[in-house]
């Protein structure tokens, strides 16, 4: 076979044929130590994914990403749009962490922790094996005429698929609106929130379509993380790898011909692959590092009395050149960069002000002279309380002789909420030497602890016209 022919698999996606039609994958049910370990990990992750919206700390959600009301709670701590810089830094840290992790461990996340893989392989695929049987029975059933048995199996499978998708859609929604609001919605009749109900049906239908039909195409064609593998992986990255030094030349007559490698060309590694690829062709974008081929090959190796690990977690360099895994300059650079961002982020998180205020002169209102020799300006104040305790705040003018009069008395700020009010600043005319006088307002809490300071300006009559 010419090199071009050997590499022809790179010209096409394993799930699309030459006519552009979908090639349906019937992966054999995996079994083995890696699959067992992944199953246990998936139980934990499923508990986290499905249980997190129900978690509460002191009556507040553990995690809430309410984009519409711009209210975010992460690990029980409230964040506001004013904390956007923290969000940007945290996102940057996450991206660099993902890059660093991928450079070292390849797509380990995809195979073990990605929600798409967890739901597909550990929920929907298991339901399919339970109803339709293993790969061979699935193929037979697909080709079979529409008998009562086939209709029953199809209806049963797709009803369960849609039911679970609807459940997933609701769980997904609860991350954004909170479990209390979701409970309120689902316990009231659909007619009271028809639009929301229709949206939920649409979301559930998309989830159902992904797991019932689109499946591995998400990982091979849609997922941006999958697309990035081409630039993130290098020959030192640890991925699921076929040991071509040990395995080649492959062939069935390995026993009789000692010149043959350990691969007996049984195709078991291909038959279990959920993305339909042959790992012996080398690292490919379609490989989600699910380890099914490792288990399949290990079982074969035990049967032919060869050491396990013909397919294993390894880097290309360790297989081709025997180079041990080590820290490369690229990894050092990402690690240092990530550490710096984490230090800055930690500092900002620990020094985050519990209250934040925005003061603006009330638009469209000029200065007033409420009594002779006194000039007043009207201001609007918006105070965000990032804590979960009620706060009362006081405003004090610093560096100027004047007073602040809050409309309605003291400013009370509700816990985890925002309060808006207005106040006057009154200054003696003698203190004004400019049309626009800069001012500083200090904000104190009820214990007289200074919590913020604000700079604003005060408009007065032109002092030259006195
Ligand atoms: S399962 Fe192992 S022995 Fe069989 S074809 Fe794959 S690599 Fe070769
Ligand atoms: S090649 Fe192996 S690890 Fe990669 S997706 Fe296929 S079965 Fe999973």
Image: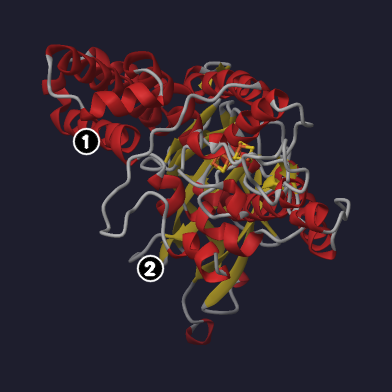
Mark carried by residue 366: 2
**Residue placed most toward the observer, 49 or 71:** 49
Mark 1 residue CB less than 8 A from any atom of ligand 2: no
State the quadrant of the N terminus.
Answer: bottom right
Residue 457 placement (x, y as % from top left): 55, 68
Residue 110 placement (x, y as % from top left): 57, 41
**Residue placed most toward the observer, 273 or 70:** 273
Whether residue 137 sits left or right of residue 329 in the image: it is: left
Say if mark 1 contacts mark 2, CB within 8 Å. no
Earlier along the polypeptide chain: callout 1 or callout 2? 1
For the point 57% across and 79% down, which residue is it? 434
> Whereabouts is ligand 1, in terms of quadrant?
top right
Is residue 402 placed above or below 172 in the rendered structure?
below
Residue 268 placement (x, y as % from top left): 55, 34
For the point 54% across and 38% down, which residue is it? 267
Whether residue 359 sits left or right of residue 243 in the image: it is: left
Specify the farthest residue to the bottom: 464
Is residue 64 placed above or below 87 in the rendered structure?
above
Tell how many labels. Answer: 2
For the point 56% across and 62% down, which residue is it? 427
Whether residue 126 sits left or right of residue 310 in the image: it is: left
Q: Which residue is mark 1?
A: 202
**Residue placed most toward the observer, 204 or 37:** 37
- Secondary structure at badge 1 equals helix
């Amino acid at each position: 076979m010419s090199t071009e022919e050997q590499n022809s698999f790179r010209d096409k996606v394993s799930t699309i044929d030459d006519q552009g039609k979908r090639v349906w994958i019937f992966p054999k049910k995996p079994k083995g130590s890696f699959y067992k370990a992944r199953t246990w990990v998936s139980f934990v992750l499923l508990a986290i994914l499905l249980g997190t919206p129900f978690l509460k700390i002191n009556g507040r959600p553990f995690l809430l990403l309410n984009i519409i009301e711009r209210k975010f709670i992460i690990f029980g701590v409230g964040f506001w749009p004013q904390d956007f810089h923290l969000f940007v830094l945290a996102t940057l840290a996450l991206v660099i962490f993902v890059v660093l992790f991928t450079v070292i461990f390849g797509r380990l996340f995809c195979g073990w922790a990605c929600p798409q893989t967890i739901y597909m392989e550990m929920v929907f695929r298991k339901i399919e094996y339970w109803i339709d049987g293993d790969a061979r029975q699935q193929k037979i059933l697909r080709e079979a005429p529409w008998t009562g048995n086939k209709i029953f199996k199809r209806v049963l499978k797709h009803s369960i698929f849609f039911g679970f998708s609807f459940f997933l859609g609701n769980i997904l929604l609860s991350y954004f609106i909170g479990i209390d609001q979701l409970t309120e919605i689902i316990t009231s009749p659909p007619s009271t929130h028809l639009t929301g109900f229709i949206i939920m049906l649409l979301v559930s239908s998309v989830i159902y379509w992904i797991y019932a039909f689109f499946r591995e195409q998400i990982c091979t064609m849609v997922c941006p993380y999958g697309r990035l593998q081409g630039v993130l992986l290098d020959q030192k990255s640890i991925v699921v790898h076929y040991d071509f030094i040990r395995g080649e030349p492959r062939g069935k007559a390995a026993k009789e011909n000692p010149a043959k490698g350990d691969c007996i060309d049984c195709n078991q590694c291909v038959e279990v692959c959920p993305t339909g690829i042959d790992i012996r062709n080398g690292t490919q974008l379609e490989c989600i590092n699910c380890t099914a081929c490792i288990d399949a090959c290990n079982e074969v190796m035990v049967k032919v009395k060869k050491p396990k690990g013909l397919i294993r977690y390894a880097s290309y360099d360790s297989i081709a050149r025997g180079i041990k895994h080590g820290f490369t300059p690229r990894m050092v650079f990402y690690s240092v960069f990530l550490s710096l961002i984490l230090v800055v982020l930690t500092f900002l998180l620990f020094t985050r002000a519990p209250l934040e205020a925005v003061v603006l002169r009330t638009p469209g209102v000029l200065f007033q002279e409420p009594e002779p020799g006194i000039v007043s300006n009207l201001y609007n104040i918006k105070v965000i309380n990032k804590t979960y305790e009620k706060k009362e705040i006081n405003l004090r003018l610093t560096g100027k002789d004047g007073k602040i009069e809050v409309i309605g008395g003291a400013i009370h700020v509700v816990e985890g909420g925002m309060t808006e009010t207005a106040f006057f600043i009154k200054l003696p005319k003698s203190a004004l030497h400019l049309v626009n006088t800069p001012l500083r307002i200090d904000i104190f809490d009820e214990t007289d602890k200074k919590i913020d300071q604000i700079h604003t300006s005060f408009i007065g009559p032109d002092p030259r016209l006195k």
